[in-house]
Structures are given as C-alpha cells and as structure tokens.
C-alpha cells in the first residue's frame, strides 16, 4: 500500500514538473514577445489612419440580456471609441427587464426599415431601431436565444468587414480599437485578434470612458486582477507566439466578418462559445488548407466588471470550466492530430491535461498527499517543503505577469498599486487558488452531469 | 543528497528569482515614473516652447546630457511623442532644435552603427518624422531585412521623409517582404503625400505601354519574386491617385480602363475617376453599365451619379431592370441624386 502511494505521489510530482516547466517556458517566450511588441508598437503611427481612407471599418456588437444597469454605459463607450469609421450594433436578446427601454430612452431610438441578411441562422428578429442622435448606432430587438445567438444576429446585421464583440458589462479603452485593428492591415492572413480584458471595478468612468485607472477596493477583485494579467499576458501571449491561440475572450475580440460566416458563426449549444469558435476556426481553416493567423495583442484593453462576491465568482468560474470542457469536446478531432500543426499537437493536449484536468488533479493531489503522509508513505517534511515550492512557483508566475504588465501597457503606474498587487500575487496561493480549483472541479462535474446554465451575474452601474 | 534537500534548493532558487523579479519591477517603476523621469519631462515641457521659438538656447550641459544613453532614451520618447502630436504638421522647428542639441547626429549614429535592426529602424523612424535626409544605403539595408516589422518601420520612415525617389523601393519592399494588405500598403504609401503622384503616374504609363506592346517591360513589377498578383499593385497605385485626386492621371486611368482585363483593377479605376471628378470619363463609364460583372455595373452607376452625368440618365434608367437587385438599388439612388424630376417620376412609376 505504502509503495503504491509512493508511486502515485511520484506521478503527481512528474505532472507538477511538466505543467510548471511548460508554464515557465511560456513566461520566457511571452516576455520576449511582449518586449518586442512594445518596441515595435512604439514605432507604429496608429493615428495615421485618421488622415486617410485606407482602413477597415468596424462593427462593434454588444449582446445584452437583462443588462439594464450597464447597457447604456457600454453602448456609449463603444460609440466613444476613437476610430475613423465605426458602427455599433446593440442586440437585445429577449431581455425581460428594462434593457430595451433604457436603450430607447438614452439613444432616442426609432424603428428602422430594413432587411436583415441571414448569413448565420439566429432566433427571430422582432425589430431594428436606429438612433436619432447617433448615426452609427443600430439596435436589434430579438427573441431570446442566448449570447451566441445574439452575436450571430449582430453579425448578420453588421455592415462592415471587421466585427468586434464586447460584453454588455465591458468598456473598450478609447485607443484600443486603432491598435487591435492594425494586424488586419499589416497581415492579410489575420482572421481574428484578441485583446486584454482587465477588471474595471472602482475605476473612474465618465461618458463611457475610463478616465482614471484605480485599483479595486475589494480583495476578491484584486485577486482577479492578478489572475487576468497572468492568463492574458503570459498565457495567451505565449500561445500567440507559438501560433496556437486556443481562446480569445468573448469580452473583447475582433474578427474578419467573412471568416466568421465561413465557419458558421457562434455555436449556440455551449457556454464557452468564444473558445469553441476559435477552435473551430483552427479546424475549418486547417481542413481547407487556408493561410490564416489568430493573434493576441497585449495592449488593446477592454475593461470589464468582475464579480466581487463569492457566489457570482463561483458561478462564473464553474461556467468557464464547463465552457472549456464543452469546447474541447466539440473539437476533439484536433487532439494529437498532426494535421492541425501546433494547435493539434501542442495547444489542444496542453489544454486538456493542464487546463481542463488540472483542478481535478490538484484536488485529488491534496487528498493523496495527505493520505500518504498519514500512511507514512512519504516524509511529511518533504510534503510541506514541496507545497511551499509549488506556492512560490505560482507566485513567481504571477509576479512575472505584473512585470510584463509594466513593460506592455503600465495601466497601474503607481508604485503603491504595484506593491499591493505583488502582495496579492503572493497571497493567492493561500486559499484563493485552492478555492478556484474547487469551483473549477464543480464546473467539470457540471459538464459531466450536463447541469448548469448561464445564470445572471449581479451587475452594478459603472 | 536527499529529495528534501533538492526541494529546499529549488525553494532557495525560487526565493532568489522572486526577489529578483520584485526588484526589477520596482526599479522599472522608479525608472519609468520615478522622480528623475518626471523631472526630465517637466523640464522639457517647460523648455520646449522657448527653445522652439529661439527665445532660449539649450546650454552646453543640456546638449551633453542628451547624448548620454539614459537621457537619450528619455528624450527619444519625448520627441516621438511631440512628433506624434504634430501629426502631419511641419516639424521644421523640432528639426532645428534636434540638430542644435546633437540629437539628430546621435540618431544618425544609431542608424548607421547599431547592431539591432529594431534600434536602427526606430532611429530611421524618428529621423523620417523630423524630415531629415535618410542615408539611402541604410534605408535600403533595413528594407532588405527579413523581419517584416523592420521593413514596415523603414517604409514608414522613408515615407515620412516624403522623398518620391524612395517610393518605388519602399513599395517593392513592403509588397514583397511583408504580408501587408493592400489597404495597409496604400495607407503607408499615402504618407509620401501628393508629391509622389507623378512617380505613380509614370509607373502606370509604363504599365500601359507594356499592355500595348504585349512584351515584357523593364518597368516596376512588384510581382517578380512573390506570389502576389500584379493587379494588386495596380490597385494600390490607382487608389493612391484617387486619394490625392490627381487629375493629370485621369487620361492614363481611362486608357488602363480600356486595356486591363482585371475586374478588380477596373472597379478601382471607376472609383478613382469618380473621385477625381473628371467628366471626360463619362462615355467610358457609361459603356461599363452593361458589363457582365454586377459590381462593376453598380460602381459605374454610382460614379456616373457622382459626376452628375445627366446625359447618361437613360442608360442608368435601364439599370432599373437589371438582373441584380443591388444594381437596381444603386440605379435608384443614382437617379435620385441626379435630381431630375421626371427621372424621379419614372423611378416611382
């Protein structure tokens, strides 16, 4: 028995070494990529497109279901984005609260005649509205079909070649649109680009624009800032360098419209529609032997409200984990398939073993180690020092992302904020991380038992 | 050495790494937004207007400090910011100040001597924005780089300098060595400003001569070594002529309209002729109203409306019976914009 426990512990150790070794590798390549990006970006004249007609117009789609509190701010923020030619399409996905009324009042909406192309199937559209005060705003009122369905309706209504999706509780940084559309000009293969999503809790927001970036007061939100930085800056940036971006956050993503239509738009039978879309793009374009690039950029930013209570956060993380599982399941053909290059051979297996299964392995690991200590299969001193080693490694990764943030966009310029975030990077190993793993395990259980829904997070006005 | 010792060593390494990361983070903050940087910026924000107007001459100490590595980087960032704010305005005063401070000379040295292509490209970019003459060999070397980012930066630098003689090398380099889109190329080349139009015009003339002779020409052919089509280069040139509304080239565009077989090129020529406002194009555009391609027919309809071609109204009216819905819609809009009452009556009938 002791021997079995010993070897199981060895297996866990090997898993730990593999997963953290790969994360360290991602940190190194992300650091190199972010540094290079910052240098190239400093040479780029983003503002130049305002003096020409050579740009690609963008449609910003804002899907909303019961978002009465935030929708007006989000649409106003999308309209305030600095870009030469922009259209905002807000999609009311069968809200039962005052979302539609809030939009009608705030933007002086009137019914608009028009025929909608049905490039991607979606739930019936009840009506189209144009604004009397903002020429670039169109509102779609439709039957409820879920977020993915609302996005599909928005894509059908959009009239420009680039389509940008943002969440109804998100605010695009005014400069970000010019930055995020740049790759579509500089590389004809680019079909999708993702930007960084950052928590906006307690930031000063005026007229739909983030005027002052402030560190959130809530501890839970601060943990999430560190977490978002880690996920975006060294996770996705590293995968982007390896040309194997597996997910672009639905809260801020921009696509070539024709590419979206080519792959059939968003799937409505998953809660991880953003990741599923990216995986499907890889699958479809590889199958068609089409040259394409899916990129992630570290400085276009979208600000979003993150949950500040345990219940909402737990629901969100469970949903994300279920979405991850569903996306991987629906595109399992990619797994270890040489035909799909880096995505099939590296990205997909890594996501299965290190993102999907890691919370379960972590929770089981705690249990096995405890049992092994009790059974005296391993030395308790060794177990404790090993735990300390794992925690420190986690802190190193979080600290590295704070450093990358300082190199890439420096949204938290004060030393005080950086020191506070460093403290949270250290503290997250003591409780928050374990809690997070537990929520993700529940998300896996939801996937296996096919339970759970989108739920309605608690929103507060910006 | 036991397992415990190994883990303890790893922990020690981790602690050192963590401390190192923390120190780098703090140092970076202090360097980027620390007292020295703030003082430097405050000083230059105050001094710049006076220095630009010649009311205050920078002291020898200031000049010496600019060329030291730490201050040079800060001043480079500061100048780039000023030039960005200036936009397409004249950088004449900033150029004089840069020369007086020795900043220009330092940039030229970086362009000539740095081993890092991105550093050289950054120097070229700022020199270009300052409209300082760029050494042809240095720019050519950057344009030959394998790194698309360096090629693009060099292209923007040369375009900012606005010397038309750089047009063809830049066009060729960005076309062949990067994956830039046609919109992207046109945006970059538009920085050359209107002075580049005669060069484009001449290139198109060569192309037309090539079409007429049906023999290989020695003129610029960006398609020589890449898998991009020649028509794409033509589209970019036509778009640039349209952007600057360069009317002397209207005749050449009309000839190309007759000679070219590429529908994409024809579409762009039609748009360009409309933008140039050349009414001499009306007969040729009217002929396109029966072209088999619906996009060309609809563009021709729109172009005729833009040119106010009332004499083509009967032909546009016939497009109300077009097989393609989109052409019919554009024909309706065109007839509305031509503004003849009897035409409106016919549309509604």
Image (tube, grey):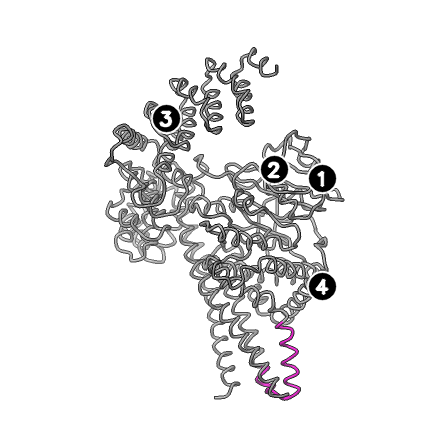
Q: Residue B89's x, y, as percent?
A: 38, 36
* Residue assigned mark 4: A449
Estimate the spatial distance between the alpha carbons at disc 1 and disc 4, rounded to whole Å.
35 Å
| Tags 1 and 3 on a common chain | no
Marks 1 and 3 close (CB-CB < 8 Å): no
Q: Residue B222's x, y, as percent?
A: 31, 40
Residue A69 falls left or right of residue A342: right
Closer to the eye: label 2 or 3: 3
Can the viewer see residue B96?
A: no
The residue shown at (70%, 58%) is A312
Closer to the eye: label 1 or 3: 3
Q: Nearer the viewer, residue A228 or A213?
A: A228
Q: Residue A300's x, y, as percent?
A: 51, 50
Closer to the eye: label 1 or 2: 2
Please name the predominant secondary structure of the magenta segment in the image. helix
Secondary structure beneath disc 1?
A: helix
Closer to the eye: label 2 or 4: 4
**Quadrant position of residue B247:** top left
First-in-chain label (2 vs 4) = 2
* Residue assigned mark 2: A157
Per the rendered image, the range of residues in magenta is A361-384
Marks 2 and 4 close (CB-CB < 8 Å): no
Identify whether A238 is placed above or below A212.
below
* Residue assigned mark 1: A100
Estimate the spatial distance between the alpha carbons at disc 3 and disc 4, rounded to whole Å.
65 Å
**Quadrant position of residue A217:** bottom right
Residue at the top extreme? Answer: B342
* Disc 1 chain ID: A
Secondary structure beneath disc 2?
A: helix
């Amino acid at each position: 028995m002791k021997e079995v426990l010993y070897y199981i512990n060895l297996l866990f150790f090997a898993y730990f070494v593999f997963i953290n070794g790969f994360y360290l590798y991602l940190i190194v390549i992300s650091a190199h990529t972010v540094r290079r990006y910052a240098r190239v970006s400093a040479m780029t004249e983003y503002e130049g497109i305002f003096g020409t007609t050579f740009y690609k117009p963008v449609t910003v789609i804002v899907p909303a279901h019961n978002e009465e509190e935030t929708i007006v701010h989000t649409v106003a923020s999308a309209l305030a984005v600095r870009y030469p030619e922009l259209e905002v399409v807000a999609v009311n996905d069968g809200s039962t609260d005052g979302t539609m009324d809030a939009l009608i009042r705030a933007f002086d909406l009137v019914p608009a005649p028009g025929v909608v192309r049905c490039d991607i199937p979606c739930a019936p559209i009840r009506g189209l509205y144009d604004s009397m005060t903002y020429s670039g705003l169109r509102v779609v009122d439709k039957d409820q079909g879920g977020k993915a369905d609302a996005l599909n309706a928005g894509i059908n209504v959009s009239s420009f070649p680039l389509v940008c999706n943002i969440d109804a509780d998100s605010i695009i940084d005014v400069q970000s649109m010019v930055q995020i559309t740049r790759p579509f000009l500089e590389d004809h293969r680019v079909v999708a680009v993702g930007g960084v999503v950052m928590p906006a809790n307690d930031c000063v927001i005026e007229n739909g624009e983030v005027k002052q970036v402030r560190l959130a007061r809530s501890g839970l939100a601060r943990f999430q800032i560190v977490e978002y930085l880690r996920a975006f800056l060294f996770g996705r940036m590293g995968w982007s360098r390896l040309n194997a971006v597996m997910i672009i956050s639905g809260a801020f993503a921009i696509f070539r419209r024709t590419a979206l239509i080519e792959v059939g738009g968003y799937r409505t039978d998953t809660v991880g529609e953003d990741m599923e879309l990216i995986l499907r793009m890889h699958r479809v374009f590889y199958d068609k032997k089409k040259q394409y690039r899916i990129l992630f950029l570290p400085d276009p930013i979208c600000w979003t409200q993150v949950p500040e209570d345990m219940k909402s956060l737990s629901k969100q993380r469970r949903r994300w984990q279920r979405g991850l599982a569903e996306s991987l399941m629906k595109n399992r053909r990619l797994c270890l398939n040489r035909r799909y290059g880096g995505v099939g051979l590296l990205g997909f297996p890594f996501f299965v073993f290190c993102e999907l299964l890691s919370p379960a392995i972590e929770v089981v690991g705690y249990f096995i180690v405890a049992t092994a200590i009790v059974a005296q299969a391993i030395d308790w001193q060794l177990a404790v020092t090993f735990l300390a080693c794992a925690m420190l490694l986690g802190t190193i990764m979080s600290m590295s992302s704070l450093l990358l943030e300082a190199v890439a966009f420096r949204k938290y310029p004060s030393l005080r904020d950086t020191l506070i975030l460093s403290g949270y990077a250290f503290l997250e190993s003591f409780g928050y991380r374990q809690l997070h793993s537990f929520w993700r395990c529940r998300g896996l259980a939801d996937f296996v038992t096919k339970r759970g829904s989108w739920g309605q997070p608690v929103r507060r006005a910006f | 050495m036991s397992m415990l010792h190994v883990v303890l060593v790893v922990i020690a390494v981790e602690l050192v790494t963590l401390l190192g990361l923390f120190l780098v983070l703090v140092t970076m903050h202090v360097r980027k937004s620390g007292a020295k940087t703030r003082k430097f910026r405050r000083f230059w924000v105050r001094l710049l207007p006076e220095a630009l107007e010649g009311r205050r001459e920078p002291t020898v100490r200031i000049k010496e400090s600019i060329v030291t590595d730490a201050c040079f980087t800060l001043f480079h960032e500061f100048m780039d910011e000023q030039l960005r704010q200036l936009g397409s305005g004249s950088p004449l005063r900033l150029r004089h100040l840069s020369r007086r401070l020795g900043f220009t000379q330092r940039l030229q040295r970086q362009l000539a001597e740095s081993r890092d292509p991105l550093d050289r490209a950054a120097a070229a970019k700022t020199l270009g924005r300052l409209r300082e003459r760029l050494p042809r060999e240095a720019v050519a070397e950057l344009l030959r780089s394998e790194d698309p980012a360096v090629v693009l930066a060099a292209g923007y630098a040369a375009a900012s300098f606005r010397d038309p003689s750089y047009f063809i090398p830049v066009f060729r380099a960005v076309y062949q060595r990067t994956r830039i889109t046609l919109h992207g190329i046109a945006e970059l080349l538009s920085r050359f400003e209107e002075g580049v139009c005669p060069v484009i015009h001449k290139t198109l003339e060569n192309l037309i001569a090539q079409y007429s002779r049906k023999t290989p020409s020695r003129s610029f052919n960006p398609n020589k070594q890449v898998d991009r089509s020649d028509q794409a280069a033509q589209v970019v040139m036509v778009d640039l002529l349209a952007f600057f509304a360069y009317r002397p080239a209207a005749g050449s565009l009309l000839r190309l309209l007759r000679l070219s077989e590429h529908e994409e090129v024809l579409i762009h020529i039609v748009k360009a002729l409309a933008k140039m406002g050349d009414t001499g194009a009306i007969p040729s555009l009217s002929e396109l109203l029966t072209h088999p391609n619906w996009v060309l027919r609809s563009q021709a309809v729109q172009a005729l409306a833009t040119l106010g071609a009332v004499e083509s109204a009967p032909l546009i009216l016939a497009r109300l019976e077009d097989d393609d819905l989109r052409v019919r819609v554009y024909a309706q809009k065109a007839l509305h914009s031509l503004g003849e009452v009897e035409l409106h009556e016919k549309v509604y009938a």
